[in-house]
Amino acid sequence: MPQRHSKNNDDLAFFTYDEKRKRGYGTQREHLGKDSIKPFDACCLCLMPFIDPLFGHKGHVFCKECIREFLLAQKKDIKRFKTVA
Protein backbone atom coordinates (compact mmCIF):
# COMPACT_ATOMS: atom_id res chain seq x y z
CA MET A 1 0.00 0.00 0.00
CA PRO A 2 1.49 3.40 -0.97
CA GLN A 3 2.24 5.88 1.78
CA ARG A 4 0.32 9.14 1.96
CA HIS A 5 2.40 12.28 2.19
CA SER A 6 1.25 15.49 3.75
CA LYS A 7 0.79 18.40 1.35
CA ASN A 8 2.52 20.73 3.81
CA ASN A 9 5.48 18.52 4.60
CA ASP A 10 8.26 21.07 5.13
CA ASP A 11 10.38 19.31 7.72
CA LEU A 12 13.10 18.21 5.29
CA ALA A 13 16.73 19.16 5.87
CA PHE A 14 16.71 21.03 2.57
CA PHE A 15 14.28 23.24 0.64
CA THR A 16 12.38 21.68 -2.22
CA TYR A 17 11.88 23.50 -5.51
CA ASP A 18 8.31 24.38 -4.61
CA GLU A 19 9.32 25.80 -1.19
CA LYS A 20 12.03 27.94 -2.79
CA ARG A 21 9.58 29.21 -5.40
CA LYS A 22 6.94 30.09 -2.78
CA ARG A 23 9.44 32.05 -0.67
CA GLY A 24 10.89 33.92 -3.64
CA TYR A 25 14.34 32.35 -3.27
CA GLY A 26 16.69 33.47 -6.03
CA THR A 27 14.41 36.12 -7.49
CA GLN A 28 15.79 39.50 -8.41
CA ARG A 29 13.49 42.28 -7.28
CA GLU A 30 15.30 45.14 -8.99
CA HIS A 31 17.95 45.53 -11.66
CA LEU A 32 21.32 46.77 -10.41
CA GLY A 33 22.90 49.47 -12.54
CA LYS A 34 26.55 50.01 -13.44
CA ASP A 35 27.03 52.54 -10.62
CA SER A 36 26.12 49.94 -7.97
CA ILE A 37 29.01 47.63 -8.93
CA LYS A 38 32.63 48.47 -8.08
CA PRO A 39 34.85 48.67 -11.18
CA PHE A 40 37.62 46.08 -11.42
CA ASP A 41 40.37 48.70 -11.38
CA ALA A 42 39.13 50.48 -8.23
CA CYS A 43 40.65 50.48 -4.75
CA CYS A 44 38.50 48.71 -2.14
CA LEU A 45 38.90 51.64 0.29
CA CYS A 46 38.70 54.84 -1.77
CA LEU A 47 36.83 53.36 -4.80
CA MET A 48 39.06 55.36 -7.14
CA PRO A 49 41.40 53.92 -9.81
CA PHE A 50 44.56 52.40 -8.32
CA ILE A 51 47.63 54.43 -7.48
CA ASP A 52 50.51 52.06 -6.73
CA PRO A 53 48.28 48.97 -6.13
CA LEU A 54 48.89 46.38 -3.41
CA PHE A 55 47.13 43.01 -3.21
CA GLY A 56 45.77 41.44 -0.04
CA HIS A 57 46.10 37.70 0.63
CA LYS A 58 42.40 37.18 -0.23
CA GLY A 59 42.62 39.04 -3.55
CA HIS A 60 41.50 42.50 -2.45
CA VAL A 61 43.35 45.33 -4.17
CA PHE A 62 44.19 48.63 -2.46
CA CYS A 63 46.12 51.80 -3.22
CA LYS A 64 49.36 51.76 -1.25
CA GLU A 65 48.58 55.07 0.47
CA CYS A 66 44.96 54.08 1.29
CA ILE A 67 45.89 50.81 2.98
CA ARG A 68 48.76 52.47 4.88
CA GLU A 69 46.45 55.17 6.27
CA PHE A 70 43.78 52.60 7.11
CA LEU A 71 46.21 50.34 9.00
CA LEU A 72 47.71 53.28 10.92
CA ALA A 73 44.22 54.44 11.93
CA GLN A 74 43.37 50.91 13.12
CA LYS A 75 46.60 50.76 15.11
CA LYS A 76 45.76 54.07 16.84
CA ASP A 77 42.24 52.84 17.66
CA ILE A 78 43.62 49.62 19.17
CA LYS A 79 46.05 51.58 21.36
CA ARG A 80 43.27 53.93 22.46
CA PHE A 81 40.96 51.04 23.40
CA LYS A 82 43.75 49.28 25.32
CA THR A 83 44.44 52.39 27.41
CA VAL A 84 40.72 52.79 28.21
CA ALA A 85 40.26 49.15 29.25
Image: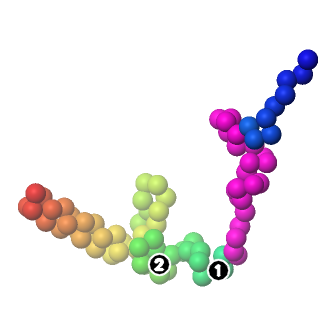
The relative height of residue 83 versus residue 46 in the rendered view (above or below) is above
Name which quarter of the figure residue 79 lies in: bottom left
Q: Quadrant of the C terminus?
A: bottom left
Identify the residue at horizontal 15%, vertical 62% (top origin).
Answer: 81
- For label 1, count other residues whose C-alpha is less than 10 Å away and answer few (under 14), some (14-19) or many (20+): few
Q: Amino acid at mark 1?
A: Lys
Q: Quadrant of the N terminus?
A: top right
Name which quarter of the figure residue 30 lies in: bottom right
Residue with the mark numbered 1: 34
Q: Tell me the SS state at disc 1.
A: helix
Residue with the mark numbered 2: 47
Q: Is residue 79 left or right of residue 2?
A: left
Q: Nearer the viewer, residue 3 or 22?
A: 3
Which residue appears farthest toward the left when viewing the image? 83
Q: Nearer the viewer, mark 2 or mark 1?
A: 1
Question: Percent position (x, y) of residue 4?
Answer: 84, 28
